[in-house]
Amino acid sequence: MKVVAFGASSSSTSINKTLASYAADLISGAEIKVLNLNDYEVPLFSEDKEKEIGQAAGAKAFLSDIAWADVLIISFAEHNGSYTAAYKNLFDWATRIERNVFADKPAVYLSTSPGPGGAASVLSAAIGSAPYFGAQVKASLSIASFYENFDLKTGKLTNPTLDEQLKTALAQLSMD
Protein backbone atom coordinates (compact mmCIF):
# COMPACT_ATOMS: atom_id res chain seq x y z
CA MET A 1 0.00 0.00 0.00
CA LYS A 2 1.31 3.45 -0.95
CA VAL A 3 0.50 6.04 1.69
CA VAL A 4 0.76 9.81 1.33
CA ALA A 5 0.63 11.56 4.68
CA PHE A 6 0.85 15.23 5.50
CA GLY A 7 0.00 17.87 8.02
CA ALA A 8 -2.02 20.71 6.49
CA SER A 9 0.42 23.27 7.87
CA SER A 10 3.59 25.00 6.74
CA SER A 11 5.15 25.02 10.22
CA SER A 12 8.57 23.37 10.43
CA THR A 13 7.50 22.01 13.83
CA SER A 14 3.96 21.04 12.82
CA ILE A 15 2.35 18.70 15.32
CA ASN A 16 -0.13 17.76 12.62
CA LYS A 17 2.69 16.60 10.34
CA THR A 18 4.10 14.67 13.32
CA LEU A 19 0.72 13.02 13.91
CA ALA A 20 0.23 12.17 10.22
CA SER A 21 3.73 10.67 10.02
CA TYR A 22 3.15 8.63 13.16
CA ALA A 23 -0.15 7.34 11.80
CA ALA A 24 1.42 6.36 8.47
CA ASP A 25 4.17 4.46 10.28
CA LEU A 26 1.50 2.35 11.99
CA ILE A 27 0.47 0.82 8.66
CA SER A 28 2.45 -2.38 8.37
CA GLY A 29 4.36 -2.85 5.13
CA ALA A 30 3.30 0.49 3.67
CA GLU A 31 5.43 2.54 1.31
CA ILE A 32 5.16 6.01 2.84
CA LYS A 33 5.66 9.47 1.40
CA VAL A 34 5.32 12.28 3.94
CA LEU A 35 4.67 15.58 2.22
CA ASN A 36 5.88 18.97 3.40
CA LEU A 37 3.63 21.81 2.23
CA ASN A 38 6.68 24.06 1.99
CA ASP A 39 7.85 21.96 -0.97
CA TYR A 40 4.90 23.19 -3.06
CA GLU A 41 5.60 26.83 -3.69
CA VAL A 42 2.61 28.71 -5.06
CA PRO A 43 1.80 32.43 -5.10
CA LEU A 44 -1.26 33.77 -3.35
CA PHE A 45 -4.18 32.57 -5.45
CA SER A 46 -6.22 35.00 -7.50
CA GLU A 47 -7.81 34.74 -10.91
CA ASP A 48 -5.51 37.52 -12.09
CA LYS A 49 -2.43 35.58 -10.99
CA GLU A 50 -3.81 32.43 -12.61
CA LYS A 51 -4.26 34.32 -15.91
CA GLU A 52 -0.71 35.59 -15.60
CA ILE A 53 1.09 32.32 -14.82
CA GLY A 54 -1.39 29.56 -15.71
CA GLN A 55 -1.23 26.48 -13.53
CA ALA A 56 1.13 26.83 -10.58
CA ALA A 57 3.96 24.30 -10.71
CA GLY A 58 3.70 23.65 -6.98
CA ALA A 59 0.04 22.68 -7.31
CA LYS A 60 0.85 20.34 -10.19
CA ALA A 61 3.56 18.67 -8.07
CA PHE A 62 1.13 18.33 -5.14
CA LEU A 63 -1.45 16.65 -7.38
CA SER A 64 1.22 14.33 -8.76
CA ASP A 65 2.18 13.24 -5.24
CA ILE A 66 -1.47 12.66 -4.34
CA ALA A 67 -1.90 10.59 -7.53
CA TRP A 68 1.00 8.32 -6.48
CA ALA A 69 -0.84 7.21 -3.33
CA ASP A 70 -3.29 4.40 -2.76
CA VAL A 71 -4.49 6.03 0.48
CA LEU A 72 -4.18 9.38 2.23
CA ILE A 73 -3.62 10.41 5.82
CA ILE A 74 -4.17 14.12 6.36
CA SER A 75 -3.93 15.88 9.70
CA PHE A 76 -5.49 19.33 9.66
CA ALA A 77 -4.01 22.18 11.63
CA GLU A 78 -6.46 24.85 12.73
CA HIS A 79 -5.89 28.59 12.56
CA ASN A 80 -8.72 30.61 14.04
CA GLY A 81 -11.21 27.80 13.50
CA SER A 82 -10.31 27.15 9.86
CA TYR A 83 -7.64 25.79 7.52
CA THR A 84 -4.16 27.24 7.62
CA ALA A 85 -3.56 29.85 4.92
CA ALA A 86 -0.73 27.76 3.43
CA TYR A 87 -2.92 24.67 3.00
CA LYS A 88 -5.96 26.60 1.74
CA ASN A 89 -3.88 28.47 -0.84
CA LEU A 90 -2.23 25.30 -2.18
CA PHE A 91 -5.59 23.53 -2.19
CA ASP A 92 -7.21 26.40 -4.11
CA TRP A 93 -4.50 26.24 -6.78
CA ALA A 94 -4.84 22.45 -6.99
CA THR A 95 -8.62 22.57 -7.42
CA ARG A 96 -8.22 24.90 -10.41
CA ILE A 97 -6.22 22.14 -12.12
CA GLU A 98 -8.24 19.15 -10.88
CA ARG A 99 -11.37 19.62 -8.77
CA ASN A 100 -11.13 15.96 -7.72
CA VAL A 101 -7.89 16.77 -5.83
CA PHE A 102 -7.90 13.61 -3.74
CA ALA A 103 -8.59 11.37 -6.74
CA ASP A 104 -11.25 9.20 -5.07
CA LYS A 105 -8.69 7.81 -2.64
CA PRO A 106 -9.61 6.34 0.75
CA ALA A 107 -8.47 8.68 3.50
CA VAL A 108 -8.18 9.02 7.24
CA TYR A 109 -8.60 12.60 8.38
CA LEU A 110 -6.97 13.67 11.62
CA SER A 111 -6.46 16.87 13.56
CA THR A 112 -4.65 17.91 16.68
CA SER A 113 -3.83 21.02 18.64
CA PRO A 114 -2.04 21.89 21.86
CA GLY A 115 -5.35 22.87 23.44
CA PRO A 116 -8.54 21.07 24.40
CA GLY A 117 -10.31 21.63 21.06
CA GLY A 118 -8.09 19.27 19.09
CA ALA A 119 -8.69 21.34 15.93
CA ALA A 120 -12.12 19.73 15.74
CA SER A 121 -13.67 22.70 13.91
CA VAL A 122 -11.39 22.41 10.89
CA LEU A 123 -11.63 18.61 10.94
CA SER A 124 -15.41 18.89 10.74
CA ALA A 125 -15.16 21.32 7.81
CA ALA A 126 -12.69 19.04 6.00
CA ILE A 127 -14.91 15.99 6.43
CA GLY A 128 -17.93 17.94 5.25
CA SER A 129 -16.25 19.09 2.05
CA ALA A 130 -14.31 15.88 1.31
CA PRO A 131 -16.84 14.34 -1.10
CA TYR A 132 -16.68 17.42 -3.33
CA PHE A 133 -12.95 16.97 -3.81
CA GLY A 134 -12.66 13.21 -4.22
CA ALA A 135 -11.71 12.09 -0.71
CA GLN A 136 -13.37 8.97 0.63
CA VAL A 137 -13.03 9.62 4.35
CA LYS A 138 -13.08 6.19 5.97
CA ALA A 139 -12.46 7.43 9.50
CA SER A 140 -11.47 10.55 11.41
CA LEU A 141 -10.01 11.40 14.79
CA SER A 142 -9.34 14.63 16.64
CA ILE A 143 -6.64 14.54 19.30
CA ALA A 144 -6.85 17.30 21.88
CA SER A 145 -3.97 18.43 24.09
CA PHE A 146 -1.29 17.03 21.79
CA TYR A 147 1.66 17.54 24.13
CA GLU A 148 -0.14 15.73 26.96
CA ASN A 149 -0.90 12.73 24.72
CA PHE A 150 2.18 12.45 22.48
CA ASP A 151 5.84 11.99 23.43
CA LEU A 152 8.00 13.89 20.94
CA LYS A 153 11.15 12.06 22.13
CA THR A 154 9.78 8.61 21.35
CA GLY A 155 7.53 9.83 18.54
CA LYS A 156 4.51 7.96 19.90
CA LEU A 157 1.07 8.56 21.31
CA THR A 158 1.24 7.93 25.04
CA ASN A 159 -2.51 7.78 25.62
CA PRO A 160 -3.45 4.11 25.03
CA THR A 161 -7.11 4.92 24.33
CA LEU A 162 -6.21 7.46 21.64
CA ASP A 163 -3.60 5.12 20.18
CA GLU A 164 -6.20 2.35 19.90
CA GLN A 165 -8.70 4.77 18.32
CA LEU A 166 -6.06 5.78 15.77
CA LYS A 167 -5.25 2.15 14.93
CA THR A 168 -8.96 1.41 14.52
CA ALA A 169 -9.31 4.41 12.19
CA LEU A 170 -6.32 3.32 10.11
CA ALA A 171 -7.67 -0.22 9.83
CA GLN A 172 -10.55 1.24 7.80
CA LEU A 173 -8.11 2.01 4.98
CA SER A 174 -7.62 -1.66 4.22
CA MET A 175 -11.30 -2.59 4.39
CA ASP A 176 -13.10 -2.71 1.06
Image (cartoon, rainbow, N blue to C red):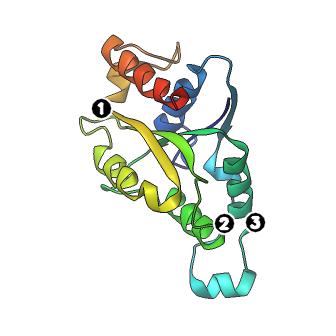
Question: Of the residues shown, which amino acid type is indicated by label 3?
Answer: Ala
The residue carrying mark 3 is 57
Image position, residue 100 (x, y; %): 58, 62
The residue carrying mark 2 is 42
Foreground pick, 174 / 139:
174
Vertical relation: 36 (above or below) 170:
below
Question: Of the residues shown, which amino acid type is indicated by label 1?
Answer: Ala
Q: Earlier in the sequence, mark 2 or mark 3?
A: 2
Mark number displayed over residue 27? none
Vertical relation: 175 (above or below) 34:
above
Question: Of the residues shown, which amino acid type is indicated by label 2?
Answer: Val
The residue carrying mark 1 is 144
Q: CA distance from mark 2 to mark 3?
A: 7 Å
Q: Are dots 2 and 3 in contact, CB under 8 Å? A: yes
Instruction: Assess disc 3: are there few (<14), some (14-19) or many (≥20) residues with their C-alpha within 10 Å of its C-alpha.
Output: some
Instruction: Assess disc 2: are there few (<14), some (14-19) or many (≥20) residues with their C-alpha within 10 Å of its C-alpha.
Output: some
Image position, residue 15 (x, y; %): 47, 34
Question: Mark 2 or mark 3: which is in front?
Answer: 3
